[in-house]
Image: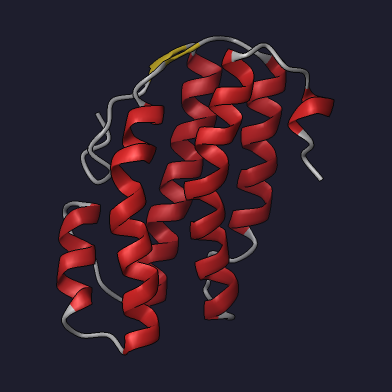
């Protein structure tokens, strides 16, 4: 159980490990970006919403609105798929480059991308599409 995200990852060990690593990176992005640590993502969003400027509130509102959808997608049984794992590893590569949050807008972009791409990758895998159809570039 990943308490911070509020989900339990199940399925193939390699796929779960890769997705768990991506989730950890995004948790660290949040923590480094805002210099705040909380027990859950909901707690983080609620705590920050009262403290941040308006342009940040739009970002936090997006995260809060998209979180139920993301959680629903993360609760699937992850099968072994080299394509699925490769897609997740690509996202890890991109996101881990921003872990220090030297450029806050890039770090926010990585978080938004995680919220968008995780459901896309899982959906496309479930539909049985190939890596080329997932269009990683």
Q: Position of residue 3 (x, y in %)?
A: 21, 39
Question: Percent from the top left, x then y, of residue 38?
Answer: 18, 61
Determine the image quadrant of residue 23. Answer: top left
| Residue 44 vertical placement versus 4 (above, below) | below
Observer-nearest residue: 47 or 72? 72
Report the colour scheme: secondary structure
Outermost residue, bottom side: 53
Nearest to the observer: residue 75 or residue 12: 75
Taking the image as shown, residue 33 lies to the left or right of residue 4, namely: right
Above or below for 67 versus 62: above
Which residue occupies 67% across, 11% down?
128
Q: In what quadrant of the picture does the C terminus appear? A: top right
Q: Nearer the viewer, residue 86 or 121?
A: 121
Tell me if 68 is positioned left or right of 33 in this view. Answer: left
| Residue 106 coordinates in the image, percent (x, y) | 60, 72
Q: Residue at x 62, y 18 (%)?
A: 125
Would residue 68 appear left or right of 106 to someone viewing this image? left
Residue at (32, 47) in percent of width and height: 67
Image position, residue 48 (x, y; %): 22, 75
Q: Name which quarter of the figure residue 64 lies in.
A: bottom left
The part of the image, by quadrant, that contains residue 76 is top left
The relative height of residue 26 versus residue 33 in the rendered view (above or below) is: above
Q: Residue at x 68, y 33 (%)?
A: 87
User: Which quarter of the rendered picture does the N terminus lie within?
Assistant: top left
């Amino acid at each position: 159980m990943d308490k911070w995200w509020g989900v339990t990852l199940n399925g193939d060990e390699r796929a779960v490990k890769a997705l768990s690593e991506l989730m950890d990176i995004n948790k660290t992005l949040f923590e480094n970006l805002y210099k705040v640590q909380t027990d859950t993502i909901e707690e983080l969003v609620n705590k920050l919403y009262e403290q941040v400027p308006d342009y940040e509130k739009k970002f936090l509102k997006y995260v809060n609105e998209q979180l139920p959808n993301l959680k629903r997608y993360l609760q699937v049984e992850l099968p072994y798929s080299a394509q699925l794992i490769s897609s997740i590893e690509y996202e890890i590569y991109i996101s881990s480059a921003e872990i220090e949050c030297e450029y806050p807008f890039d770090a926010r972009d990585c978080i938004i991308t995680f919220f968008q791409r995780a459901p896309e990758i899982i959906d496309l895998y479930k539909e049985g599409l190939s890596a080329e159809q997932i269009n990683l570039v």
